[in-house]
Image: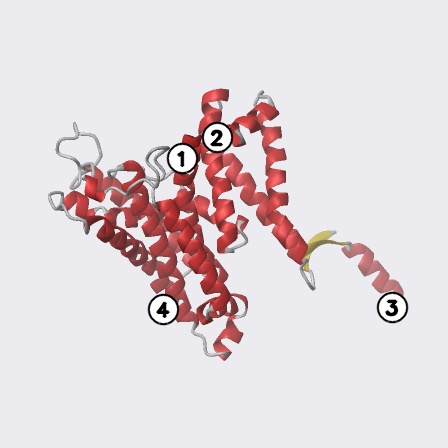
Amino acid sequence: MRIELEKRPQASKLFGLVSPLLALVLTLIAGAIMFALLGKNPIEALDAFFVEPLMEVWSLHELAIKAGPLILIAVGLSVCYRSNNWNIGAEGQFTMGAIAGSFLPIVLYDWHSPLVLPLMLVMGAIGGALFAAIPALLKAHFNTNEILTSLMLVYIAQLFLDWLVRGAWRDPQGMNFPVSRDFAPEAVLPAIWEESGRAHWAFVFALIAAVLVWFMMKYTLRGFEIVVLGQAERAGRFAGFSSRKMIWFSFLFSGALAGLAGISEVSGSIGHLQPAISPGYGFTAIIVAFLGRLNPLGIIASGLVLALTYLGGEAAQLSLGVSDKVTRMFQGLLLFFVLSCDMLIYYKIRIVWSRVHSAIGKTAQ
């Protein structure tokens, strides 16, 4: 006996739309079981995780702060994944964007100008794009596996950031702590509505990026090229599309959005560089992209859901006394169920009874 996966002749569009909701429901059920095993009331735990963070205006601002980078990064990754280029290193591109954009407020600290913030955002996007160009170059010209190269570059970026804030960019008046200078007011991303909370313009950038990419994918030749090369590369080449150019475009585009998310997070939420500037946004954004069905508008909703897991995890730590690893557990369960549901949509499980078939064949002879 052996188990095989057989591709379905035609996947159900209805199940394709329902799949993310089913994955979310299964995640909640698995989460309830997990809390019960930890000795916590599942209903109270899920309420603390998913309901309490939505009850206050200030927490809605915090939700927008967490969702902004997730949506920005996931929108860029959706272009990569739909073109069949697997960028797993958005966390590193996020970090390098934060470093590149922070050059002006740290190295040129005495320069005060309205141009500082716009230049920081542009430099952050360029920094992320240039870092993403490394796996693009290796894949396009040396056929290197982009999953491995982009992932390994994440740790190089993180170590480089750690080296900077402990060395050349450490604040000389920072009591020897591994942080950079605090950004000047001109270098701080302003809040959207200061009277009620601290959510800043990164969330607006994310919404604009999602709408523009949705328009590109739906109504432009570039979007058609992305879909064709992602689904049938040979057909795309026959139509005159270049897979090598698409590798460069998708990696540079997703890296630029990740870099913009990085400098926006540092400028809007933190106000300086430090060894840890991300709770794993670049990796979580992969879940956001797939939960949103690689559709930029769906990514907005899934980004809010995953941002809620960060807030809910913090609330659960305080009210229930559970570990901060619970957040990662929820995110991992969500990705597992999303991929599992997708597999069952496109494939069916078939049990092959080898001995029975061989016996029938011999009888027939």
Q: Which residue is mark 2?
A: 53
Q: Nearer the viewer, residue 134 or 362?
A: 134
Amino acid at circle 1: Glu
Q: Residue at x 46, y 39 (%)?
A: 307
Q: Secondary structure at mark 2?
A: helix
Percent position of residue 208, x then y: 40, 54
State how far apart marks 3 and 2 are (Cα).
Answer: 69 Å
Q: Residue at x 48, y 21 (%)?
A: 319
Instruction: Bin the neighbour count of mark 1 within 10 Å (Cα to Cα): few under 14, some 14-19, many 20 and up.
Output: many
Instruction: Bin the neighbour count of mark 2 within 10 Å (Cα to Cα): few under 14, some 14-19, many 20 and up.
Output: many
Q: Which residue is mark 1?
A: 62
Q: Is residue 350 above or below residue 68?
A: below
Foreground mark, 3 or 2, reads 2
Instruction: Bin the neighbour count of mark 4 within 10 Å (Cα to Cα): few under 14, some 14-19, many 20 and up.
Output: few
Q: Tell me which numbered mark, 1 or 2, is placed earlier along the sequence.
A: 2
Q: Is residue 52 above or below residue 184?
A: above
State how far apart marks 4 and 1 are (Cα).
Answer: 43 Å
Percent position of residue 94, x then y: 34, 48
Q: Tell me which numbered mark, 3 or 2, is placed earlier along the sequence.
A: 2
Q: Which residue is mark 4?
A: 141
Q: Residue at x 40, y 36 (%)?
A: 61
Using the rendered image of the protein, determine whether residue 125 is visible from the camera's viewpoint.
yes
Locate residue 222: give its quadrant.
bottom left
Amino acid at circle 3: Gln
From the viewer's perspective, is 282 left or right of 188? right
